[in-house]
Image (cartoon, rainbow, N blue to C red):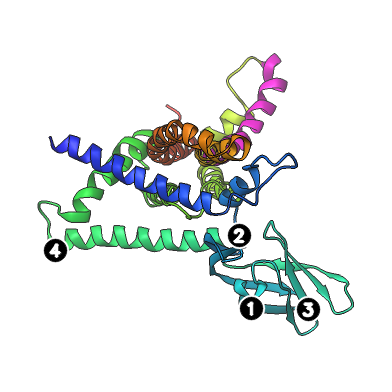
């Protein structure tokens, strides 16, 4: 009975999030039209999954029918010609205004790319170190990770026996990652890498789930983020590699005649492993977001093509499919954190494995 109630609660929460996402999507779909007048979902989908200099929440229409975006402004930090300029993204007025700092004039395009020119309209090179939507979301996830893990640690200090509250929820998960992923694949030297792999697991897991909320940032669906995570694994694996690991790469146990083929393959494999980590996480998370938004878009495509009647006809089927995909995404979010941590542990384990 309790299990049924939990499943029902999860389904209701998912439906609520789905309805919220649909409403946000519907508020500004009318302007995205193709040349034939049919709704074009691509700009809106790309807007939802890409990074930006402001945290867009929703749009609203005024009495004249014009759309006005509502966003949380974020800090813009730019290094230009030896000068550091700081201002809020709201100064751009959603791309309608330029920002001038002394002789430097900044503008932002629809893809959230900032360019700079001087007062003579000559282009200037800039280094953008702004707190973007993804960066802000990562900072929130880091604070959340610190809160969860520190609460668990403090719980052990106060209660050394039966775990309670957050401690009771996280302890089985931490033990699962430590014993069944890290220790099982790395072996006796697992303790050196436990902190890193636990951090990676919870970072990916929390950002995956945060990304499923309406209006949230798509952190793990950004290839720059997955690249850095994969590079951490690559650097740790390379530094930790023992004599046996490098011997297997440059002197594989194959016949001499195959050496010219196998050695380049082994060297190539050193770089393809982190590349696979990067692309797998990026592609799976991004594909999930695009699939959900595409299914929601079917309602508005039907409306723009055949009227409100067609939209109401498509809506029930579209909503059911989206709810189904959304529930799968809840599982995928956990699986991707698990797979990334598992493969990282496997790669590190191969690097530190002793020859028997």
Mark nearer the viewer, 4 or 1: 1
Res 158 label: 4
Vertical order, 125 against 178 (above or below) = below
Q: Is residue 49 left or right of residue 105?
A: left
Does dot 2 land on a helix, a strand or a loop? loop
The Cα atoms of the two marked residues, 4 and 2, are separated by 43 Å
Q: Residue 121 location, x and y as percent?
A: 88, 73
Secondary element at image label 3: strand
Q: Earlier in the sequence, mark 3 or mark 2?
A: 2
Quadrant in the picture for the N terminus: top left
Q: Which residue is mark 3?
A: 104
Q: Residue at x 18, y 58 (%)?
A: 156
Q: Position of residue 130 (x, y in %)?
A: 61, 68
Question: Given this view, does label 3 or label 4 mark the residue nearer the observer?
Answer: 3
| Residue interval drawn in magenta | 256-285
Residue named by callout 2 = 52
Q: Earlier in the sequence, mark 3 or mark 4?
A: 3
Q: Which residue is mark 1?
A: 86
- Binning the other alpha carbons within 10 Å of mark 3 as few (below 14), some (14 to 19) or many (20 upward) gives many
Q: Earlier in the sequence, mark 2 or mark 1?
A: 2
> With respect to residue 65, does 230 lie above or below?
above
């Amino acid at each position: 009975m309790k299990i049924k109630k939990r499943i029902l609660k999860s389904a209701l929460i998912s439906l609520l999030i789905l309805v919220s996402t649909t409403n946000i999507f519907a508020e500004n779909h009318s302007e995205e039209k193709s040349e034939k007048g049919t709704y074009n979902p691509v700009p809106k989908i790309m807007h939802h999954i890409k990074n930006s200099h402001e945290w867009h929440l929703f749009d609203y229409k005024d009495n004249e029918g014009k759309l006005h975006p509502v966003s949380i402004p974020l800090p813009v930090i730019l290094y230009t010609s030896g000068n550091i300029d700081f201002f809020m993204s709201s100064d751009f007025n959603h791309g309608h205004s330029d920002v001038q700092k002394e002789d430097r004039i900044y503008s932002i395009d629809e893809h959230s790319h900032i360019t700079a020119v001087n007062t003579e309209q000559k282009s200037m090179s800039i280094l953008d170190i702004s707190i973007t939507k993804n960066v802000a979301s990562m900072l929130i996830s880091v604070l959340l990770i610190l809160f969860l893990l520190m609460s668990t640690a403090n719980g052990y200090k106060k209660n050394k026996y039966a775990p309670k509250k957050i401690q009771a929820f996280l302890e089985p998960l931490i033990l699962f990652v430590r014993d069944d992923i890290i220790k099982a694949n790395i072996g006796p030297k697992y303790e050196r890498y436990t902190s890193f792999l636990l951090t990676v697991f919870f970072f990916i897991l929390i950002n995956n789930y945060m990304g499923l909320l309406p209006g949230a940032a798509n952190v793990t669906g950004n290839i720059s983020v997955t690249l850095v995570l994969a590079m951490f694994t690559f650097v740790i694996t390379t530094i930790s590699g023992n004599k046996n690991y490098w011997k297997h790469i440059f002197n594989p146990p194959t016949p001499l005649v195959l050496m010219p083929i196998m050695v380049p393959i082994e060297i190539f494999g050193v770089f393809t492993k982190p590349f696979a980590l990067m692309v797998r996480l990026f592609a799976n998370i991004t594909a999930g977001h695009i699939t959900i938004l595409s299914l929601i878009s079917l309602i508005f495509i039907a409306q723009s093509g055949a009227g409100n009647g067609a939209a109401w006809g498509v809506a029930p089927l579209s909503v059911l499919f989206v709810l189904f995909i959304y529930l799968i995404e809840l599982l995928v979010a956990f699986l991707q954190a698990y797979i990334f941590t598992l493969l990282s542990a496997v790669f590190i384990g191969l690097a530190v494995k002793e020859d028997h």
